[in-house]
Image (cartoon, rainbow, N blue to C red):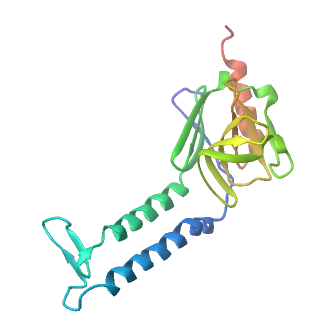
Amino acid sequence: MGGSDPKPFDVAESSPLRVLWIVLPLLAAFVACLYAQLYKAPASAPWIEVTLSPPWFRMGGSAAWSLLVIALLGIGLGMAFFRRRVELAGDVLDVRSTMYRRRVPVAQLRLDQAEVVDLQRDRRYGIRVKTNGYSMPGFYSGHFRLQGGGEGFALVTDRARVLALPVSDGSTLLLSVDRPQALLDALRKVAASAPRQ
């Protein structure tokens, strides 16, 4: 395997409709702010106004930055939801998930303890608490405390088939990939070809 040619592994598919967990609440907030802006506006105020001095953007006569912030937040979080990648680049496993990234040298993975698990049945790796993560029903991304007591980095889109990769620092990578055994085999091949120290 060439050090400059990263080998991608497809992330297990999940419904793109899950992004509605982000979009619908933000859309409701946007509509509520829009209503509040227009409801209290004087009749003579223009519906929308862009100026060259602060606040630069007015709606119904008052500053409407909240609408812009909500729209940008919705676009940003929606785009982040679809950022998912698992790659083996040389001797480093690179996992990108929403706003998070974890790079782990293969030498630090405890491949003899790696296994494919069902998170609904196997409580050791069950996700308990977000420490710095992003989640919604059926999707977990980022850093979590696990039910077994350790810490984990998750890119989980399918709880029924997750590759659990313990790391030498005591944490665990939880990855939903289409072919978990293929990723595990590739990691073992890289580990076997690494020079012994």
Q: Residue furthest top?
A: 197
Compared to residue 22, the image places residue 128 above or below, namely above
Q: Quadrant of the C terminus?
A: top right
Q: Nearer the viewer, residue 70 or 194?
A: 70
- Number of labels in the image equals 0
Q: Nearer the viewer, residue 80 or 186?
A: 80
Q: Residue furthest bottom?
A: 43
| 195 relative position to 122: left or right | left
Q: Quadrant of residue 22?
A: bottom right
Q: Quadrant of residue 192?
A: top right
**Residue shown at the point (31%, 85%) measured from the top left:** 40
Compared to residue 153, the image places residue 73 above or below, namely below
| 35 relative position to 191: left or right | left
Q: Quadrant of the N terminus?
A: top right
Q: Residue furthest left?
A: 52
Q: Residue furthest right?
A: 121
**Residue shown at the point (67%, 24%) measured from the top left:** 169
Q: Position of residue 14 (x, y in %)?
A: 67, 60
Q: Position of residue 80 (x, y in %)?
A: 50, 55
**Residue shown at the point (81%, 29%) measured from the top left:** 113
Q: Nearer the viewer, residue 150 or 121?
A: 150
**Residue shown at the point (23%, 92%) measured from the top left:** 43
Compared to residue 163, the image places residue 134 above or below, namely below
Q: Position of residue 102 (x, y in %)?
A: 57, 36
Q: Quadrant of residue 110?
A: top right
